[in-house]
Image: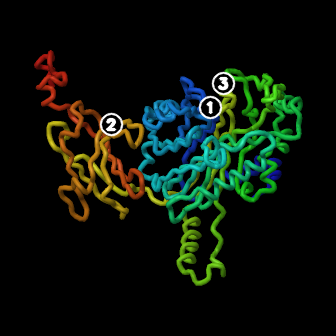
Amino acid sequence: MMEETEEQSHPHQFEDSLKEEPRDGDTFRVHVVTWNVATIDPPDDVTSLLHLNSPKSADLYVIGLQEVYSGPVRFVSDMIFEDSWTGLFTSSLTPLQYVKVSSMRMQGLLLLFFSKLEHIPFIRDIQATYTRTGICGYWGNKGAVSIRLSFYGHMLCFLNCHLAAHMKYASERVDEFEYIMDRQTFDCRKAPRITDHRLVFWFGDLNFRIQDHGMHFVRSCINNQTYNLLWSSDQLIMMKKKEPLLQDFEEGALDFQPTYKFDLNSDNYDSRLYRTWFGFNSKKRKPAWTDRILWRMRPKAPPPDEQDGNDSTLYGEKIKQLDKEDEYPLKVRQDLYTSIMEYSISDHKPVIGIFTLELRKMYDTPLVRLQAEGDWSADIDSLVVYSPLQPFPASTWDWIGLYKVGFSSLSDYITYTWVKDDEVAFNEEVMQVFVSKEEIPVRGGECVLCYYCSTLQCIIGISEPFKVLESRVAIEEGLLPDKTVGLDKNHSE
């Protein structure tokens, strides 16, 4: 891996090395957001934050927030109902055919993962977890939340952190990060730890500061946009030179204003004096790049060596891993790394990183094909027909959900049926599952069916959209308006 100084002194050479064309690969756009929202309610619009008007749409959105308000009453309410930040991002992305695949909340830390609908059957092995590093390691005001998954067979992990604050605690921040990396584990044989994943995105309010330089020099560099003069005193860049774990992570150039600390509802850096417990005025907070987005490509698996001993299983796994990485390459390129200055509700500015993943898919067909059989309405019992296209770990807890076209999340189903309990006919290739008419909406509408695999914790098949008809019985009983009333006979069809 290049030293930090080499990446900074030859940025174009470094970028060019990532722009090689993939071998028979596909490209996917990943939009990462990190924002310390300072317990404030969300803005009315996040179009700029998500680049929703960009001609290139994202395939995946990963949104990490810190300091989401978590007072006792609000936190309990957010656990029962959707919190306002999740609601805003969901309502902004759902009309554009994005689905909330997973989320994880630990007090003020929130991580959201959205995907285009077309990728949903190829996102598998989804797991989420959290680690507290706050007061005595028990309080969740600091720590990390993560989501890991398999994307077309490539193992990805997204880690949202909020580390210890204040200038003098740079070493403690590194210790917290190492603790998080050590403690977070997943029930996944191929990638039980964060570092086992092929690609890791690490982001959040990492709280690293600019040391050595005084306030006047820092603000002068910001005003003159000579940000590079501050890089050598950025604590994260400094720590990367001596901490092996940090050296595996790459970061784009900090060619944007430090994102902390601003006066609320302003683009002015901290202008207030703060009173300490002892009654003296403390200094203004020095601007800093506290909010960061980094990534790590897992080093290629070393060839089997003598340390494997007689463990033939370990030897075989390493051989398979080497072969698979050669056959299914994965590359990452950062296309944009910047702050979004127009948002002023917090003392932090949000930061976005837009990445292109170049990869060769390990699979491109869903595990299950399913469709609605015949006409569907609340007047008759209906059937779902599904066919396994590849072997998968079926379970008695698998279910098929009926969703409106444009559904927002996995929990947004109209109804569901247990696959094994309601199976009425099957052979080796085609299965039929019964759906009671009492479960079908009387108002009808455009719908899709989704097969959820409990073992893989994800949707493994989505049907083509189909029409659920309005209930004629409900119309006759006056529960629904008859749309044909008042039409001329010549136009009744």
Q: Amino acid at mark 1?
A: Val
- Front residue of 382/141: it is 141
Q: CA distance from mark 1 to mark 3?
A: 10 Å
Residue that appears at 60% across and 61% down = 196
Q: Quadrant of residue 264?
A: top right
Q: Is residue 266 left or right of residue 315?
A: right
Q: Amino acid at mark 3?
A: Ser
Q: CA distance from mark 3 to mark 2?
A: 36 Å
What residue does disc 2 label? 404
Display coloring:
rainbow
- Which numbered mark, 1 or 2, is in the foreground of this view? 1
What residue does disc 1 label? 37
- Front residue of 136/155: it is 136
Q: Is residue 390 left or right of residue 112?
A: left
Q: Amino acid at mark 2?
A: Lys
Disc 3 and disc 2 in contact, CB within 8 angstroms: no
Pointer 1 local density, CA inside 10 Å: few below 14, some 14–19, many at least 20 = many
| SS under mark 2 | strand
Residue 314, x across and y down, in percent: 56, 75
